[in-house]
Image (cartoon, helix red, strand yellow):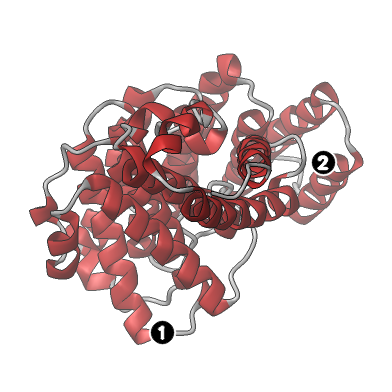
Amino acid sequence: MPNLSFNVRMFLHKFDSLSQSGADFGRIEAFLAESLEKARESEDFDSALIVAGERVNFYRRFGRYDEIYKVVEEYLDLAAPAKIENTSRQVDVLLVSATALFSAGEYDKAENLYLQAEQTVEKQCGLSGKSCENSPAGNNVFGNNVSGNNSVGNSSAERLPLIYSGLSRIYARTGRVEQAAEKLRTVLDGLEKRQEISPSDLNVLRDCAAINTELSMLFFKSSDIDPSAGSAADSAADSAAPADSALRYAERAVQICEKNGIYGDVYALALLQHAQMMHAQMMQAFSGFGAKSAYSENCAASENCDFSEDSAADSAADSADEIKTMSALETAFSKASEASFESFGAGSDCYLAAESALSLIRARLAALRSQPSR
């Protein structure tokens, strides 16, 4: 018989205090390892799952990817003694583990866990979770910090957006863009149906904005996406140039955020993607320059965000038109920079990408404005 008791509330309080105090990795890891051992010794496997889930997320946040697979395995091994098979709790454990492995670049392992999570939902709720679709809403599609103590919703069906979003990212990273688009559209379709039922649900609206941003990134990355896979309205629009679809999805994301007072990281990413798509459209309109060479799926992370080709537009647009367009870009990137600073900080990739773009745009504007009138 266990002779110890484990107080999960005290654990969470101390863990939060250590995290907020700026304690180093070693100190927090020692506390997590000790707490996990105590929970196991007390045979409180529900609490052990909570501790292990926090530990996985902790390793992910600190970027300890070389060691993360071990802590994920320990987390998954607790599912059996906790007796959570075919429950929403099991889906949460699989999601946390899959997200961690995805962050570590273990795409095959992460995909396997996401698929296991999908199969678990289907066992509970039927194919695509339709028999659970009337369950209360409340999950955030991008809630990557979900762990054993922080359920993403009351129904396993509410985990489907998380599962499909995770799979879409893996498919995009591994060159399966058609499958990625299909998953994102499935998520968006489900969210929009939920929005019809609860039009003021900010969680659903936030998720809609985030998925539109992801679709924008995906469409700009590749033209190998079948437009017939989406809804009738989107399919017709997506039959146009992928860059046009990318801009449309980005505009939609920003509109959802601004109309409903949604700020924070989702808004910042939407603004940055929209600004980048505005620039890409400008490059195509002024010069026919292949804007894809200036951007990639990682552009929001400041990679390949090169504005050095702006000179290609010089001979194709008159100064007044170019000044007007560049001024609009300056406004768009300024908003993205401010939102990125507030959400991610001055050292974040998003903020640095926006600031880099702004410096080049402002230099271009200064040069244009210094030219003699024609």
Q: Position of residue 339 (x, y in %)?
A: 67, 55
**Up-down relation of residue 269 to residue 111 (above or below):** below
- Closest to the observer, 112 or 333: 333
Q: Residue at x 88, y 36 (%)?
A: 22
Q: Secondary structure at mark 2?
A: helix
Task: Tell me if 178 is positioned left or right of 293 in this view.
Answer: left
On the rendered structure, is 6 left or right of 43?
right
Instruction: Using residue 135 as the reference point, say whether residue 18 is left or right of it.
Output: right
Residue 102, position in %: x, y?
A: 44, 30
Q: Is residue 33 above or below residue 328?
A: above
Q: Residues within 10 Å of mark 1 (few under 14, many from 20)?
A: few
Is there any visible trace of residue 260 in the rendered image?
Answer: yes
Q: Which residue is mark 2?
A: 19
Disc 2 marks a residue whose amino acid type is: Ser
Type of the residue with mark 1: Ser
Percent coordinates x, y for residue 298 in the rendering:
46, 32
Which corner quadrant holds the N terminus?
Answer: top right
Name the quadrant containing residue 212: bottom left
In percent of width and height, residue 293 lies at 37, 26
